[in-house]
Amino acid sequence: MAVLRKGILPILLAVVISFAGTRLVACAGPVWPSDDEQLFLDAYRDYVADNATSDQYDRADKLFVEAVQVLSDTYVENIDRPAFVERAIASLPELEAEDNTPSGIVGAALDESLHDLDPHSAYMTDEMFRRLQESTEGSFAGVGIVISQDEDKLIRIVSPIDDTPAARAGLQPNDRITHIDGHDMKGEPIAEAVRLMRGRIGDPVTLTIQRKQENFDVTVKRARIEVPSVTASIIDNDLAYIRVSRFDASTLDQTREYLEMLEDQIGSPRGIIVDLRRNPGGLLDSAADIADQFLSDGLIVATEGRGERKLRSYEADSSDYFDGVPMAILLDRGSASGAELMAAALRENGRGVIIGEQSFGKGSMQRIMPLTSGGGLKITTGYYTTPENHIVQGNGVIPDIEVKLQDAEEFEREVDLEHALPPRRRDPRKVLASMDAASCERDIEVTRIGKSATNDNSVDTEGDGEARELQRDTVLECAVGYFSDGQLAVYRDQVEPLLRAGL
């Protein structure tokens, strides 16, 4: 089993997307169809446009045969190849493919059949690869605005991001975007607005703006927009707070910058709160690196392939910020993949206590595998294991102190997804204490520091979803109470000895 120091492999060889740990692997070599695969190659031709060429058919045939071979070699479970091909044939009449070229039909059939294996395996077009790279870089090419949709179904600008084309063009909060390059945006979803505003760096996009009773056009050139994934605050003058909203290529540098600020401004805090709520994951290397900032030694995470074969592990070997300072890690049902692994690593190494809700339960690993015939596959190839050899997949991470929200929204977890892989090797821990969030209400003083003082990460930036209204954060107030007095202080006295004992 290889032990890797994080950051040694290039980023493109360790790509992990939201809800998935993913590695990029090139595939090559001749492929020949089996009798079963030939049945598919004969069947899909009935669904292709009449003007398809022989070269297009040859490319698509190779795409399918190569994809099945790669799947058979690398999927986390043994694949019944004839059954997979049979499902692909059965999917053809139901396909809703916009691209009816040979590769378009084959790609759609592969995608449908891969989703039947598990919810995270998929076929990826070249455009999907480009978006994947954007999502892991922590930046994108756009105009730089935070958007939402108002009650009239118009795209509303919540705020322009500082030092971006949108800010320099004079766009203002509460401006409405009625058209993008002439496309009427009334009633269109946020995702469509994002798609139209993103593009190549330097290319112009024209926004039609409604400001009170005035309508006018603004043309801006797209630029590289950096999206912060970390914010930090000082709470009640002596509690350090850091929130990590995802793990991308820039998250580690941001985290170190804020941790150094917190150490400089507080010195020896009463406690530190690490907030991983609504964090869907991201780059595995990034998640392991950030866990390492709080650990001087110990296993952080390992990966396990077909037949429980150990693949690799990530060991702590970095600095230890706030050494000896009590830590609370916040999780909720939206915390997934890397966020779950980081929380488990900190707790199982005796570093912190987990407060909040049981997490999402996404503990499978995906590899991105480009195909020589175009596009590629995202295939589940293994599971993540925690330092104590538990598997998060399907189980999630159980909090030490459970905080129950009165109006908790309905939220599917991994096990609720269609074709989800079954749970394995569950952590036997139980909740040590449970309480209603309302009982934690207390007035706290929150002082944001650094760039987060002006960029409020509680509102999603362009392309990441709709803006959320700020409201009382009773779970955070519970965590503050854990370091203070009252009911949670009693829990702290009970939980801390168990944590230090590794229970």
Image: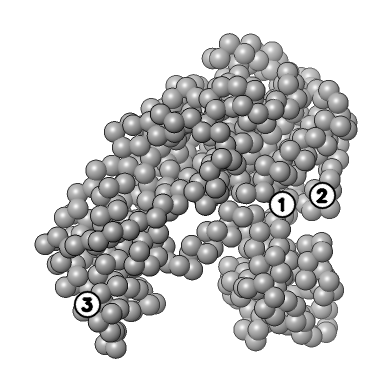
Q: Are marks 1 and 3 in contact (CB under 8 Å)?
A: no
The residue to which callout 1 is attached is 228
In which quarter of the view is residue 57 placed?
bottom left
Q: Residues within 10 Å of mark 2 (few under 14, many from 20)?
A: some
Indicate the amino acid at tag 1.
Answer: Pro
**Residue at the spot x=63%, y=39% of the render?**
276
Indicate the amino acid at tag 3.
Answer: Arg
Q: Are marks 2 and 1 in contact (CB under 8 Å)?
A: yes
Residue 144 versus residue 52: which sits nearer the camera?
A: 52
Q: Which mark is residue 451?
A: 2
Q: Residues within 10 Å of mark 3 (few under 14, many from 20)?
A: some
| Helix, strand or loop status at disc 3 | helix
**Residue at the spot x=69%, y=27% of the render?**
319
Q: Can residue 364 be seen from the camera position used here?
A: yes
Residue 338, compared with residue 44, is above or below; it is above
Specify the farthest residue to the left. Answer: 35
Real-space Cα distance between discs 1 and 3?
47 Å
The residue to which callout 3 is attached is 45
**Residue at the spot x=84%, y=45% of the render?**
450
